[in-house]
Image (cartoon, rainbow, N blue to C red):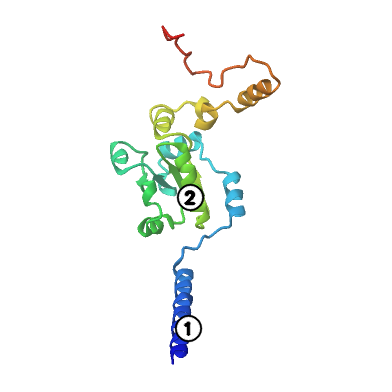
Amino acid sequence: MINQQLNYSAALFFAIIVLAVAFCQVTSKRYGASNARVAEMLSDKPYFSYADLHQVISTDTKDQFLIVDLRSTISFKKDHLPGAINIPEEDLLNRNHRRTLKDKKPVLLYAAQEHRAVAAQALLLGMGYEDVRIIPGSFETIRENVLEGFNPHNAFYSSDKARFDFPRYMSVQAIQSEGESRAAPLMPDAPEPNAIPGGC
């Protein structure tokens, strides 16, 4: 009798586990693209240049794109790109926002910092959205270079390129590895350190 009860208990426990696994498989989010496909799409044409953005805003063709501001609602209310909608980055996976993004228009993302828009782009591409591009730089940089006064010199601006001079960084690393003590500063715009009086 005890053996029979143990067998029933074990079968019931096993059935509960099987049902739980099946439930998780059915309700889990499916990604629309493999990692390799996402990497390919990211390297294909990830940025929407300031020249293109200026043309879209000045010719009033904003309705051909879904411009998404990933900043907070408070920041969005203070200022945003013309025609943009606000989807804070932490709400990007919300079901209502996913419905909005399913529109057939190309999606243009911008955020308070460019790396946040890059992360959101990778997430959306992984979920199966096809045409998702980034407006480079922070919103302040976009406002300065596109809204306040477009300068063709900054038409293909990238804040990462402006912030980091990678060839120079690599040459500094090579010099240091050869044992030379003198190296060029990594950040040319950085102020020189001030001498602190006193000490040893």
Name the residue at 50% across, 57% down.
Answer: 127
Residue lying at the far bottom of the rendered structure: 1
Rendering quarter of residue 59: top left
Name the residue at 31% across, 38% down.
Answer: 75
From the top left corner, tell me how far across and down residue 18 is, in percent: 48, 76
Q: Are marks 2 and 1 in contact (CB under 8 Å)?
A: no
Rendering quarter of residue 13: bottom left
Q: Label 2 crowding class (10 Å Cα cut-off): few <14, some 14-19, many 20+? A: some
From the top left corner, tell me how far across and down residue 118 is, in percent: 49, 43
Q: In terms of depth relative to the viewer, which is nearer, 21 or 94?
A: 21
Residue under pointer 2? 106
Marked residue nearer the N-terminal end (2 or 1): 1
Front of the two marks 2 and 1:
1
Res. 156 visible in picture: no
Under tag 2, what secondary structure?
loop
Name the residue at 50% across, 34% down.
Answer: 51
Residue lying at the far right of the rendered structure: 178
Marker disc for residue 11: 1
Q: In terms of depth relative to the viewer, which is nearer, 73 or 66?
A: 73
Going by the numbered disc 2, the residue's amino acid type is: Pro
Q: In terms of depth relative to the viewer, which is nearer, 41 or 123?
A: 123
Q: Specify whether 184 is left or right of 83.
A: right
From the top left corner, tell me how far across and down residue 120 is, in percent: 46, 47
Position above or below: 88 against 22: above
Under tag 1, what secondary structure?
helix
Res. 41 visible in picture: yes
Label 2 and label 1: CA atoms lie apart by 52 Å
Marker disc for residue 180: none
Name the residue at 40% across, 37% down.
Answer: 112
Residue lying at the far top of the rendered structure: 197
From the top left corner, tell me how far across and down residue 34 is, in percent: 58, 57
